Amino acid sequence: MTHAQPRKRQHLVAGIAGLLFALGLGLAGMTDPNKVLNFLDLFGDWDPSLALVMGGAILVYAPVSRWLQGKSSPRLADQFHWPTKRDIDSKLVGGAVLFGVGWGIAGYCPGPAIVAATGAAGPVLVFFAAMVLGMFLYGLIARRRDTLRAARKAA
């Protein structure tokens, strides 16, 4: 078996998982920003369906995650990449606030926006473009910051 074959399997499994996620979002109606906005409207036309979707996801993920943490490695990779950072810092809080504000204003988070953008026009495409631009700009800023830090350490 060549080195490229396991990589192809990883991509195939990731693609299937992404497709299942997209289908689940679509079937649950989570690509409709009004579902999210109505979930966040506690004193108006509150819609609990997002909470049910999240609860269902947690019920599936939690036992599988516990089971996988007892394994030495995944089947299609050399190691697991579990999060190691557990502290709450300004980057985490700032990112959470930015995410929450964007989610509350637009009614989209990245996954549903990507799914909705595949078959829609208008506001979701504006959100999607802004999301991609924001990720690109963050990457530029982070690389610049890291370059400056490395230069300061070397000096």
Image: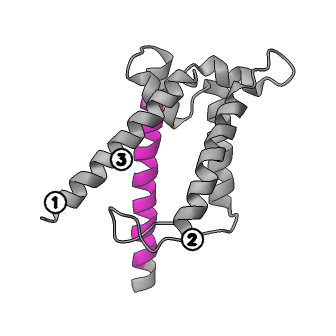
- Give the answer, above or below, for where 127 lies relative to 34: below
Q: Give the range drawn in magenta.
A: 129-151
- Secondary element at tag 3: helix
Query: Left or right: 23 with respect to 54?
Result: left
Q: Do the residues labelled 1 and 2 touch (CB within 8 Å)?
A: no
Counting residues from the start of the chain, the first of labels 1 and 2 encountered is 1
Viewed as shown, does residue 93 lie left or right of 149?
right
Magenta span main SS: helix
Foreground: 116 or 126?
Answer: 116
Badge 2 element: loop
- Which secondary structure, mark 1? helix
Q: Is residue 90 left or right of residue 44?
A: left
Q: Which of the 4 quarters of the picture holds residue 155?
A: bottom left
Q: Position of residue 37 (x, y in %)?
A: 69, 22
Mark nearer the N terminus (3 vs 1) = 1
In the rendered image, which residue does mark 1 sit on? 4
Residue 155 seen in the figure: no
Q: Mark 3 and 1 residues: CB-CB less than 8 Å, in contact?
A: no
Residue at left 70%, top 64%?
88
The CA distance from mark 1 to mark 2 is 29 Å
User: What residue do we see at 13% from left, 65% from top?
Assistant: 1
Which residue matches tag 3? Answer: 14
Residue to which mark 2 is pinned: 84
Measure how far apart labels 2 and 3 are at the Cα level.
Answer: 22 Å
